[in-house]
Amino acid sequence: MPTDPTAVHSFVALPPVEATAATNRIEEEVGELFDRFRRPLLRYLLSFGLTVSDGEEVVQEVFLALFQHLSRGGSRSNLQGWLFRVAHNQALKHRSRSRLNSESFAEEKVAVDPAPNPEDRLAHNQTRSRIAAVVQALPEQDRRCLALRAEGLRYREIAGILNMSLGAVSISLARSLAKIARTAER
């Protein structure tokens, strides 16, 4: 597939059958790259001090990003380097999020009364209600994908359980999480 900017537009405009075939080819390519680079990426991520579980999560995020990159017609040159660069950046983000969480946890230990005040509880309950309404309004397949992901299943496992392509799982989860994030920000 060409990697020039006009190629992206032509890929998007493909008829449904050709688009599905293109998505399947990308999905197969990403699957082969996953099989080839999963362990080396995980070893690299563990060098950042991530746990195996967190490392696996980051590896999944890296390959989801790869699928999206290739689906948009992104460059295929030096995909190995691309994978390790994205893994590096994701590991740094994950590590700083973990550090922030542990620092906020330490601050919570010092607090005299860690219970939220009434205004915070009300805001939290309203946000939960809005999010629950958004989740209930999602199509059934999106709700199922989201529920399985919440249970800790990997994208490939969700795809197998729901008889969907890996790309369809990725798109479903991205769409659902974006809706939930927009709702939570309000």
Image (cartoon, rainbow, N blue to C red):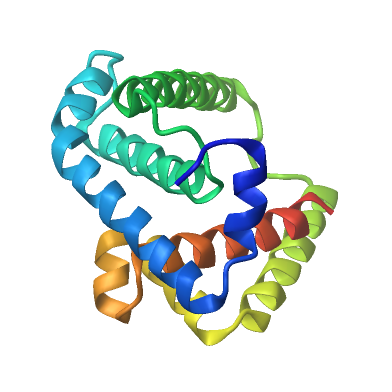
Q: Quadrant of the C terminus?
A: bottom right
Position of 15 relative to 155 (above/below): below
Q: Nearer the viewer, residue 47 or 76?
A: 76
Residue 142 screen position, x and y as percent: 52, 75
Please report the residue visible at 17 percent of the width from the left and 22 percent of the height from the top: 43
Please report the residue visible at 46 percent of the width from the left and 41 percent of the height from the top: 65
Position of 13 relative to 73 (above/below): below
Residue 174 screen position, x and y as percent: 56, 57
Whether residue 53 is visible, yes or no, is: yes
Please report the residue visible at 40 percent of the width from the left and 19 percent of the height from the top: 85
Please report the residue visible at 47 percent of the width from the left and 78 percent of the height from the top: 17
Q: Nearer the viewer, residue 163 or 145?
A: 163
Q: Pick out the residue farthest to the bottom.
A: 140
Q: Nearer the viewer, residue 156 or 180?
A: 156
Q: Is residue 153 left or right of residue 96?
A: left
Position of 167 relative to 147 (above/below): above
Residue 104 screen position, x and y as percent: 57, 24
> Toward which corner of the image does residue 177 lie, by quadrant?
bottom right
